[in-house]
Image (cartoon, grey):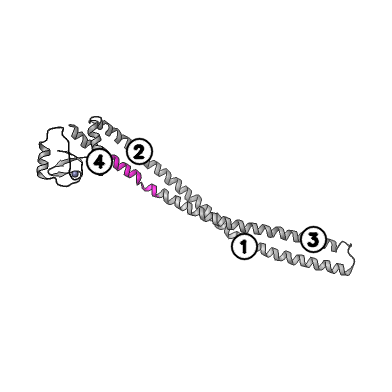
Amino acid sequence: MTELDALVDLQEHDLALDRFRHRLATLPERDEVATAEATIAKLDARATEVRSARDVAAAEESRYDDEARRLADQAAAAEARLYSGEVSSPRELQALQADIEQLKRHQRSVEDKQLGAMEQREPLDAELASIEADVASSTQALDAARRRLEASAAAIGADMTKEAAARAEVASRIDPDLIADYERCREKANGIGAARLVGMTCQGCHLSIPATEVDRIRRSPAGSIDHCDNCGAILIP
Ligand SMILES: [Zn+2]
């Protein structure tokens, strides 16, 4: 095998490696991971919103609860005084009775507000629990997608390692300067650094090469390097 023939071999290994890299970059598992991550981010944002509304309602509920207890204690203390026998003046007893009524009315109105806050909090608690369950199942889906991605990437990685070793073996038989030229062409010509000249067509770009040029290339001494005028690839007659 001539050095130029080896260059075609090298090109095939490089294209195989390019395909592996492309497959690695476009694994469908990447979309699955991204979708699951986006779903979780959305759920987290919604959970933060619901949690803060729930916390406001819960704080209000607890504040009304404290206030209702305080009013109940005050009414109980006033009732204890009413029945203690310490107060004997009818006017004072009447005033005390009125105080107790007022405290109990106030307590009932605070309890109504407490109930209102509870009615606000409960559906928020339920929504939060449902969001948290969704986050848990989406997190499981994300973990599974990540594991599948890792497995697929590892399989491609193993194939790439083999391919790279085969490429290195071929490259070891080619002059480093020629490889450097090939690499430069490959960069410019969309991955094609060397192409067979079949008939009058460059197999890199599939464009025709003028007959006189083809003739010149076929007659050039062994080891001389010619490039395709169209794509720049090293032409292998
Ligand atoms: Zn070409």
Q: Gap in Å between the C-alphas at discs 3 and 1?
A: 28 Å
> In the image, is residue 23 part of the stretch drawn in magenta?
yes
Q: Earlier in the sequence, mark 4 or mark 3?
A: 3
Q: State how far apart marks 4 and 3 are (Cα).
A: 93 Å
Q: Quick one: label 1 or label 4, which is nearer the N terminus?
A: 1
Q: Position of residue 79 (x, y in %)?
A: 82, 63
Q: Is label 4 in a helix, a strand or a loop?
A: helix
From the viewer's perspective, is residue 54 above or below residue 176? Answer: below
Residue at the spot of label 1: 119
Q: Quadrant of residue 53?
A: bottom right
83 lies above or below 162? below
Q: Is residue 41 above or below residue 155?
A: below
Camera-near label (4 vs 3) is 4
Residue 64 image offset from top left, x and y in percent: 69, 60
Compute the Cα span from label 3 to label 2: 78 Å
Ligand 1 near label 2 (Cβ, under 8 Å)?
no
Residue carrying label 4: 186
Residue drawn at x 69%, y 63% is 111
Q: Quadrant of ligand 1?
A: top left
Quadrant assignment for the N terminus: top left
Element type at mark 1: helix
Q: Which residues are magenta?
A: 14-31
Pointer 3 residue: 76
Return the disc, 1 or 2, that comes first in the chain's sequence: 1
Q: Which residue is mark 2?
A: 157
Asked if marks 3 and 1 touch (Cβ < 8 Å), the reply is: no
**What is the crowding at mark 1: few (fewer than 14 residues within 10 Å), some, or many (at least 20)?**
few
Can you tell which quarter of the image residue 127 is in? bottom right
